[in-house]
Amino acid sequence: MTLILPPVDHDRLFKELLTTFFWELLQLFYPEMPPQLERKSLHFLDKEVFTDVTLGAKHEADLIAQVSWKDGKRRPAWFLIHVEHQSSAQAQFGKRMFQYFARLHEKYDAPIFPIVIFSYDRPHRAEPNRYRVEFPPRTVLDFQFEVIQLNRLQWRDFVKHENPVASALMAKMQIAPQDRPKVKLECLRLLVTLKLNPAKMQLISGFVDSYLRLNREENTHFERELEKEQPKKQEAMMEIVTSWMLEGMEKGLEKGLEQGLKQGRQEGRQEGEAALVLRLLQRRVGALTPMQEKRVRRLNVEQLEELGEALLDFSAAKDLKVWLAAHK
């Protein structure tokens, strides 16, 4: 059964990533900045809403952070960092960034450091980093902003950075088709090395899996390379892979259930879910006996979902035997 996943909510994924790892974003792309700043002073302002008076349209600024200088000698003592995420190309985007800047500057009367993250796959052309107003022979306005255009960055340049933002954003950088399994594996290696808490680990792994979903051939290559890892690291990496598979199954089943009810595919859903659970079981406890496999295939959808969650705690074949005995 093919799992049909809901569309990726780009803005939500990026906002969660950037708010959780804002300091790490600065360390990765602007390493000269964090040493000058008071980390404890960082806090995010309420989302600003700007109205286009000519068109009547409303636009929301994605992320506005307030932070103070460390030495306390600069005036003013604090400034704003405005981060805007763009998941699609847009004409006259520089003008919009200037409008954000002007209105924020008018309201807060403070310096503003503007950053744009372009995350779309195409086009590959370099996006402008300025908005100019000219009155020949003079330039009356030359507004500039920082640009992080992911599809023009090489993932290989970031693989050695022990930084959670690097482990996530590599999934959206310039990747040759044949390198997709390798990049996902490198993201996974880096994620294991970082030793984040479970919530942050799940955030990064979910981000990577959302943007680097491998097809069957790519996944086979990925699994083959994963098997070459040292046992201890492989175990940690497999925990993340298992969570990817279960999360994908859950999302796919939500969509699949909606369509299955309309198309009468409940039986196909059960068979597909059983096949996925059997695959996860083989990775956790080894080969199953023919009788165990038969028992699993006969479970209903609700029991399969329950087993899919329980198997994360399995460490030996006896765990499956106990579980099946309790769910006759």
Image: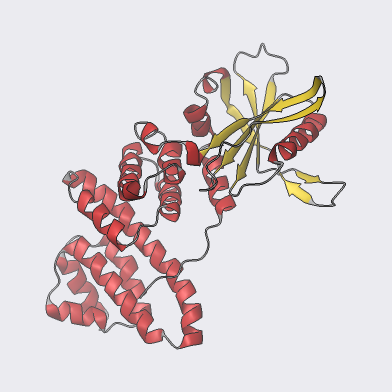
Q: Depth check: give the residue in front, 270 or 141.
A: 141
| Among the 4 quarters of the image, the one containing residue 267 | bottom left
Please identify the residue farthest to the right as the structure is shown: 54
Give x and y (percent) for residue 3.
40, 70
Residue appearing at x 53%, y 50% in the figure: 13
* Image mark count: 0
Please identify the residue farthest to the front as the structure is shown: 137
Quadrant of the frame with the C terminus: bottom left
Please identify the residue farthest to the top as the structure is shown: 73
Give x and y (percent) for residue 135.
84, 25
Residue appearing at x 81%, y 19% in the figure: 138
| Among the 4 quarters of the image, the one containing residue 97 | top right
The answer to whether 268 is drawn above or below residue 205 in the figure is below
Residue 248 lies left or right of residue 139; in this view the side is left
Give x and y (percent) for residue 211.
45, 52
Give x and y (percent) for residue 307.
30, 71
Q: Depth check: give the residue in front, 61 or 314.
A: 61
Residue appearing at x 21%, y 61% in the figure: 284
Residue appearing at x 35%, y 72% in the figure: 306
The answer to whether 102 is drawn above or below residue 301 in the figure is above
Residue 81 lies left or right of residue 205; in this view the side is right
Q: Depth check: give the residue in front, 303 or 25.
A: 25
| Among the 4 quarters of the image, the one containing residue 194 | top left
Residue 313 lies left or right of residue 164; in this view the side is left
The answer to whether 216 is drawn above or below residue 323 in the figure is above
Q: Depth check: give the residue in front, 147 or 91.
A: 91
Residue 250 lies left or right of residue 291; in this view the side is right
The answer to whether 235 is drawn above or below residue 142 in the figure is below
